Amino acid sequence: MPVLKVIDRDGAEHEVPARSGLKIMETLRELDYGIAAICGGMCSCATCHVYIDEPWANKIPAPMSDETELLQELAYYKTGSRLSCQVDMTNELDGMRVTIAPDE
C-alpha cells in the first residue's frame, strides 16, 4: 500500500497509508487533521484543496479546465494547488507529499 506524506494545517507531517485506485481526497477526509470534502468529489467546492510538492506535480495528470477555474478563484491558490478529489492515488505516487491548504 502506498504511503502519502501529509502536512496538516499546523505544519506537522504525517505518513498515512493511501489505497491505490482511490482519490487522494478519500484518504484525507478520513483523517482528524484532514479536509472537509463537502461536495464528495464533484469538483465543485474546493474544500479538498491541497498543495502537491514540486517533484510530484509532474507525475500526475494536469488539471482539467473546471478544476483550474475553481482553483484560480481561491485566495490561497498557488503553484502546486490541486483539488485532491481530482487526483488518483497510484503505487507510483508512494511517498508523495501534500500540504493541506488553509480554509477559505
Image (spheres, helix red, strand yellow):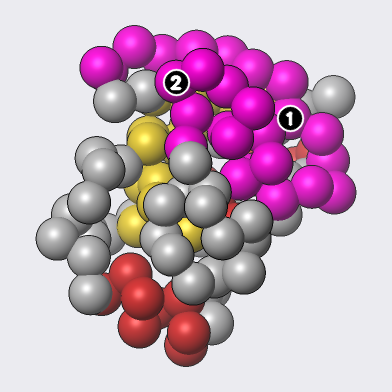
Above or below for 89 versus 71: above
Closer to the N terminus: mark 2 or mark 1? 1
Judge the density around disc 2: few (<14), some (14-19), many (≥20) Cα neighbours within 10 Å. some
Name which residue lies at 57% across and 22% down.
Answer: 31
Q: Is residue 61 left or right of residue 21?
A: left
Find residue 48 and report its horizontal and vertical position in percent. 47, 49
Q: Height in image: 28 above or below 21?
A: above
From mark 2 to mark 1, how far is it between C-alphas? 15 Å
Any mark on residue 69, and which? none
Mark 2, residue position: 33
Instruction: Identify the residue shown where x is 37% and y is 23%.
Output: 8
Taking 1 as reference, is 47 left or right?
Answer: left
Q: Position of residue 10 (x, y in %)?
A: 25, 17
The stretch of residues the image draws in magenta is 10-35
Work out whether 80 lies above or below 55. below
Figure label count: 2
The crowding category of the residue bearing disc 1, from other C-alpha atoms within 10 Å (few below 14, some 14 to 19, many at least 20), is many
Q: Position of residue 88 (x, y in %)?
A: 71, 54
For residue 18, which numbered disc appears in the image?
1
Q: Amino acid at mark 2?
A: Tyr
Quarter of the image where the N terminus is located: top right
Q: Is residue 22 magenta?
A: yes
> Is residue 86 shown to the viewer in this render?
no
Q: Name the residue type under label 1.
A: Ala
Q: Are marks 2 and 1 in contact (CB under 8 Å)?
A: no
Q: Position of residue 41 (x, y in %)?
A: 63, 60
